[in-house]
Amino acid sequence: MFHSVGPENHPWTWNHISGPLATSEAKIARLRKKGFAGVFWSGLYEHMVGRRMLLDNSIRLPFDDGYLDNRANVCPIPRKCGMRGTIFVSPDFVDPSDAVRPNLDDVAAGLSGQDELTVADFLNWAEMPVMERSGVIDIQSYAMMHAWYFSGPKIVSFHEPYQVTPHPWLFWNARLDRKTFYRNENQQQRLPWGYLILEHQKPLATKRFVPDEGTVDEITSFVATHGGREIFVRPDRRSVLERQVAMTH
């Protein structure tokens, strides 16, 4: 199972799911060398409902989330290796642009320079059918809301300044229209410092818990009047803020 392929050392919370291009290509090439044959999602579906039988050497290569680097870097690999891959896209993350951006095929053909490849973004609707027409990439649905929601009242943390925030989904939920750009934007100031971060789960697995607005306003106002972001330099910041929350009840 793959996700992002290519961007290395990108300041990103989930950089660990981005594999080097050369490594990813080597993995796919090795699978083919070992005799595996890639099948599309539709082929697996046909097998599951009993309309056709897949060979024992069949394998499905999923690329989750719909990252633009799947077009820029991945699309040429299955063709080179004689394999097929499926990209699972979350519509909430689809880029609103309508231009088909270049990939490694364009670089090889002299139509684009290597430095013109954009990777740290998401696919747009114009690029998906182009990839499908290659015959080696299949586009399927992941989930509309690929995010996290609060699932209960237990406090996990408080929104504080980070070089790379561990909770980017807080800002997705606050500004859905900017969700697809989060890898290239510092979105931390979309919410006030001290905003409550409660226990959370993915939307497909939980009912959404909505915190009390009065409590949220009280704690963020306290932070704003006690130094703002500077309060998070204090080693006892967590206990100070938790006492303040307790005082609001």
Image (cartoon, rainbow, N blue to C red):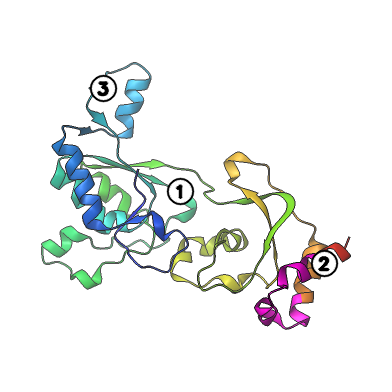
Pointer 3: what residue?
A: 54
Looking at the rendered image, the quarter that the C terminus falls into is bottom right
The one of 75 and 14 positioned closer to us in this rendering: 14
* Magenta-colored segment: predominant secondary structure: helix
Relative to 37, say whether 162 is above or below: below
Left or right of 236, for residue 95: left
What segment is highlighted magenta in the picture?
223-242
Residue that badge 2 annotates: 243
Q: Position of residue 94 (x, y in %)?
A: 43, 55
Quarter where residue 156 is shown: bottom right
Query: Spatial distance from mark 2 to mark 3, Cα to Cα?
Result: 60 Å
* Lower sequence index among marks 2 and 1: 1
Q: Using a 10 Å C-alpha cutoff, classify the residue at mark 3 as few (fewer than 14 neighbours), some (14 to 19) or many (20 or more).
A: some
**Label 2 vs label 3, nearer the camera:** 2
Query: Nearer the viewer's eye, disc 3 or disc 1?
Result: 3
Asked whether the beta carbons under mark 2 and mark 3 sit within 8 Å of each other, the answer is no
Q: Is residue 140 above or below residue 21?
A: above
User: Label 1: which residue?
Assistant: 90
> What's the residue at 16%, 32% (across, down)?
35
Q: Check the image and report above or below for 14 versus 88.
A: below
For badge 2, the amino acid type reads Arg
**Local SS, label 1:** loop
Quadrant of the image for the N terminus? top left
| Other residues around mark 2 within 10 Å, as few (<14) / some (14–19) / many (≥20) | few
Say which residue appears at 16% left-offset and 34% top-offset: 34
Image position, residue 95 (x, y; %): 41, 59
